[in-house]
Image (cartoon, grey):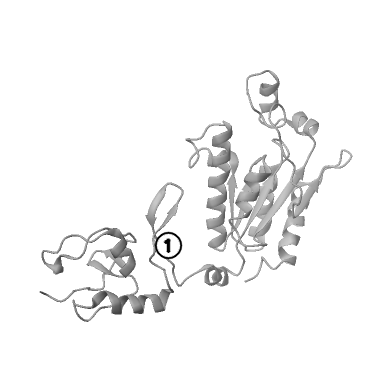
């Protein structure tokens, strides 16, 4: 029987399949569990060990290569797991991680989560904050609640379950931006504490910065920039936050921007307050 041939590929496709290279002859396909256990990885050149651990013989290929692979990646790196409805999935690490990306762009990735009633000024603050950081040569990206519903979350309604899923998805995307070293600004009502706390739990301590725009309902309704309060009062919108659906104010926000006695700070002033917070905590340098 021929020896195992594992030629390094030019391009890797990061996935696992229950199949062994054709150089094994007439052997039957192996199980997913075996492939995961030995670290086999699909590529344009056939199956290989994920970290170039090459066995020297067919009789004992798995033990030797797996030992090398485990030494590189750590014990259990190829064990399958389950995430939600996904089964038999394996996390694949890369030597280039968040610290390396942060050093490259000279900033620390984080999520600035702006919450408040409709009309409180969340989107306006998000843009002012992005402009202020951009002027300091810092890389940002805004995840605006309405904008995301034009694409990624266009399949979701405003029913309670879909609203929770909307926030969950945005939280996951925001955490990916933060992991990339980007300062991600998420701007959405996110009315329930448990949903906001679930997003916070996705990030390391200090990387989730909740900004509460504490503007009273009567002020937001007087502004009514999208005409939604008027539609809600007319009964044309059901379940509108602040009218016939609750808004749970944050209890321990990192930053509270308050509307006081008819006085509201300008968007730029509020943005500078957030930027000062980031500077004090070292987010604007690697």
Judge the density around disc 1: few (<14), some (14-19), many (≥20) Cα neighbours within 10 Å.
few
Classify residue 75 by image quadrant. bottom left
Q: Position of residue 286 (x, y in %)?
A: 62, 71
Q: Secondary structure at mark 1?
A: loop
Query: Height in image: 117 above or below 85?
Result: above
In this rendering, position of residue 132 left or right of residue 258: left
At 66% from the left edge and 29% from the top edge, which residue is drawn?
A: 240
* Residue 7 rendering spot, x and y as whole percentages: 22, 73
The x, y position of residue 94, in whole percent, is 44, 69
Q: Is residue 30 left or right of residue 108?
A: left
Q: In the picture shown, does residue 266 fall above or below 163? A: below
Residue appearing at x 77%, y 33% in the figure: 217
Name the residue furthest right.
261
- The residue at the point 69 percent across, 68 percent down is 282
Any part of residue 39 in sight: no
Say whether residue 159 is left or right of residue 136.
Answer: left
Q: Quadrant of the N terminus?
A: bottom left
Q: Nearer the viewer, residue 273 or 71?
A: 71
Q: Quadrant of residue 254?
A: bottom right
- Residue plotted at (68% across, 53% down): 129
Question: Is 247 or 80 nearer to us in this picture?
Answer: 80
Q: Nearer the viewer, residue 76 or 244?
A: 76
Q: Quadrant of residue 57?
A: bottom left
Vertically, is 141 above or below 64? above
Percent x, y of residue 33 = 31, 61
Q: Is residue 284 visible?
A: yes
Q: Residue furthest top?
A: 234
Number of marks in picture: 1
Identify residue for label 1. Answer: 91
């Amino acid at each position: 029987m021929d020896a195992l041939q594992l030629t390094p590929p030019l391009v890797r496709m990061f996935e696992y399949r229950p199949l062994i290279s054709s150089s094994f002859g007439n052997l039957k396909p192996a199980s997913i569990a075996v492939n995961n256990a030995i670290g086999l990885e699909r590529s344009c050149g056939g199956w290989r060990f994920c970290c170039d651990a090459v066995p020297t013989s067919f009789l004992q290929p798995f033990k030797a290569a797996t030992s090398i692979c485990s030494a590189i990646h750590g014990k259990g790196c190829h064990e399958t797991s389950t995430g939600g409805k996904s089964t038999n999935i394996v996390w694949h690490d890369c030597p280039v991680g968040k610290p390396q990306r942060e050093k490259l762009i000279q900033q620390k990735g984080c999520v600035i989560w702006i919450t408040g009633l409709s009309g409180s000024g969340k989107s306006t603050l998000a843009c002012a904050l992005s402009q202020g950081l951009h002027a300091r040569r810092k890389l940002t990206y805004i995840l605006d609640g309405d904008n995301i519903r034009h694409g990624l979350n266009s399949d979701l309604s405003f029913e309670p379950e879909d609203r929770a899923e909307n926030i969950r998805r945005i939280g996951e995307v925001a955490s990916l931006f933060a992991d990339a070293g980007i300062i991600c600004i998420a701007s959405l009502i996110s009315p329930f504490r448990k949903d906001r706390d679930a997003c916070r739990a996705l990030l390391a301590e200090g990387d989730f910065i909740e900004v509460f725009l504490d503007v009273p309902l009567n002020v937001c309704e007087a502004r009514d920039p999208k005409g939604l309060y008027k539609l809600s009062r007319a009964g044309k919108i059901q379940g509108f936050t602040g009218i016939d659906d609750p808004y749970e104010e944050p209890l321990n926000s990192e930053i509270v921007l308050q509307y006081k006695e008819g006085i509201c700070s300008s968007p730029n002033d509020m943005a500078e307050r957030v930027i000062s917070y980031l500077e004090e905590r070292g987010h604007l340098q690697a």
